[in-house]
Image (cartoon, helix red, strand yellow):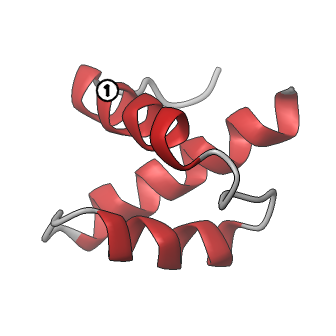
């Protein structure tokens, strides 16, 4: 089993995907830069978690 994502991570991720779906890719590093540009999350760990979750969702489907 993997790590469980909190409601905050899921909510932010789905909002970003809905608003900026065409910009997001399967590349974690590009998604990390996009998340940093689009949000004001000060925590590096949370930004990386959101970018990783976006990457995972894009790879799935």
Q: Nearer the viewer, residue 53 or 58?
A: 58
Asked if 12 appears above or below 34 in the picture, the reply is above
Q: Residue 60 occupies which quadrant of the picture?
A: top right
Q: Is residue 27 left or right of residue 54?
A: right
Q: Is residue 30 left or right of residue 61?
A: left
* Position in image of residue 48 (x %, y %): 44, 63
Q: Residue 7 occupies which quadrant of the picture?
A: top left
| Residue found 71% across the figure and 40% down from its top | 56
Q: Nearer the viewer, residue 2 or 15?
A: 15
Q: Is residue 37 left or right of residue 58?
A: left
* Position in image of residue 8 (x %, y %): 23, 30
For disc 1, the marked residue is 11
Q: Nearer the viewer, residue 22 or 49?
A: 22
Q: Quadrant of the N terminus?
A: top right
Structural crowding at the residue carrying mark 1, measured as other residues with C-alpha within 10 Å and reported as few (<14), some (14–19) or many (≥20): few
Q: Is residue 49 left or right of residue 1?
A: left
| Disc 1 secondary structure class | helix
| Residue found 28% across the figure and 72% down from its top | 44
**Number of marks:** 1
| Residue found 43% across the figure and 38% down from its top | 13
């Amino acid at each position: 089993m993997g790590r469980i994502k909190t409601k905050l991570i899921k909510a932010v991720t789905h909002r970003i995907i809905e608003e900026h779906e065409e910009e997001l890719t399967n590349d974690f590093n590009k998604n990390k830069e996009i998340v940093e540009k689009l949000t004001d999350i000060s925590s590096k760990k949370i930004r990386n978690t959101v970018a990783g979750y976006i990457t995972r969702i894009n790879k799935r489907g």
